[in-house]
Amino acid sequence: MKSYTDKVKDNKLAQGILLGTYILVTTLSLYLSGKSVIAFLLLLASLLLLHFTKLGRNTKWGIAALVLVVLLPLSASQGDAYQSYMEVGTLVGIYVAMALGLNIVVGLAGLLDLGFVAFFAVGAYTYSIFATPQAANFLSFGTFPLGGEYFWVFILIGGFVAAIFGILLGIPVLRVKGDYLAIVTLGFGEIIRIVFNNLDRPINITNGAMGLSSITPPKLFGLTFTFPSQFYYIALVILVLTIFVVRRLEYSKIGRAWKAVRENDIAAQSMGIHLVRTKLTAFAIGASFSGMMGVVFAAKQTFVDPTSFTLLESITILVMVLLGGMGSVPGVILGAAIMTILNMQVLTELTNWLNQLSLNNVISIPDALSPAKMQRFIFGAILILFALYRPQGLIPAKNPIFNAAKLKNGSTPKGQEKQKQEVSLKKESASYVNLDS
């Protein structure tokens, strides 16, 4: 058995066949069952198996696109739970993008941020104010609410406004770090929520605690986006863009500068890294992803109010990063997906199952101990277990291994992606010291 496993580990063809068989079986299971949480989760688990295979990068992206764009929606659409599955998929995409943004701040730059949900709120309110009649209260020009066609522009505007708020947060916290940084960012998040909660006088901008309702849904070529199955593709496109940008930044000049600041900001500054510029860039880029997803969230929910952006949401996003592995893009994606699915689907289904058993007098469980109400307790227990036995996260961050001989010779064998990356890093290393001089 062990020899067979070793052969599969080194054989791309065998891995591809086994993975394809697994995807086919789980897809058919979900398609035929109509409603099966287990089949739905097993199909999503194929993406995790795909990550650990030794297939080429383009092949992995192609298989992932096939699963997420075609197989998952098609197989889930045969049952009554189609929209609920797509709702889970949409929220997974939203929270994964937010966790990747926070990973830039916490995982790469080493800046502990406990108020990250504030940028999510900024993006959501940026679109909500103009997609409802609310903007007419303080603007004397224009016709409000704006049409759904403006949603696509507001995705960029929401990201830009959130980035500005990220810079405004970064400026006063440049001189603090550690626990003090956490306290300042926590205060910033609470200030933003309280401001939105009280910004209904003397000029009514956010409608205060009542929130904003009847937000205009997106429109494209005459099609109105109202169902979770439609927002699923919007979240998926933004998520792919986020992953692409984060992966490109990770080993770029600015990405290596973030890591240097994370390890030792004094040493990084002595090597020519501009601390102010580097930290502000981390806050701005991380906040922009959260702001874009805030726009999507507001359009999907068609209602926003300050209670959606509490400190608990910031803590949840931070737990996603810690659970997956700080600084690890695949780990953060896995951590955010697990937390969201556990909250939205697994605990809910488990509660329904236990309630059904209670109604049938099979087992008696107090209502206060239902898994849905014990959500925070379960999350806390999971975090404690991982802190004790897997402190680096589910998929820890790995530094690239460089071949000294290849770096000196500058030779790049054709078709070897890792050595191409090494040569690229070598070309940039000459100007690394003078990064921000």
Image (spheres, rainbow, N blue to C red):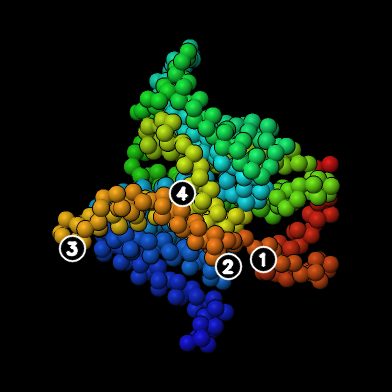
Residue carrying label 4: 93
Q: For the residue carrying disc 4, how many other residues have a C-alpha within 10 Å: few (<14), some (14-19), or many (20+)?
A: many
Q: Can residue 361 be seen in this view?
A: yes
Question: Mark 1 to mark 2: distance in Å?
Answer: 9 Å
Badge 1 or badge 2: first in the primary sequence? 2
Q: For the residue carrying disc 1, how many other residues have a C-alpha within 10 Å: few (<14), some (14-19), or many (20+)?
A: few
Q: Position of residue 257 (x, y in %)?
A: 74, 49
Circle 1: residue type = Glu
Badge 4 or badge 1: first in the primary sequence? 4
Residue carrying label 1: 417
Residue drawn at x 50%, y 58% is 384
Residue drawn at x 51%, y 39% is 117
Badge 2 or badge 3: first in the primary sequence? 2
Vertical comparison of 182 with 82: above or below: above
Q: Where is residue 12 in the image (x, y as percent from the top left)?
A: 54, 76
Q: In which quarter of the image is residue 206?
A: top left
> Element under label 2?
loop
Q: Can residue 253 be seen in this view?
A: no
Q: Which of marks 2 and 4 is in front?
A: 4
> Element under label 4?
helix
Badge 1 or badge 3: first in the primary sequence? 3
Question: Mark 2 to mark 3: distance in Å?
Answer: 51 Å
Q: Nearer the viewer, mark 4 or mark 3?
A: 3
Residue drawn at x 22%, y 55% is 355
| In the image: residue 88, left or right of residue 437 | left
Residue carrying label 3: 362
Question: Mark 2 to mark 4: distance in Å?
Answer: 24 Å
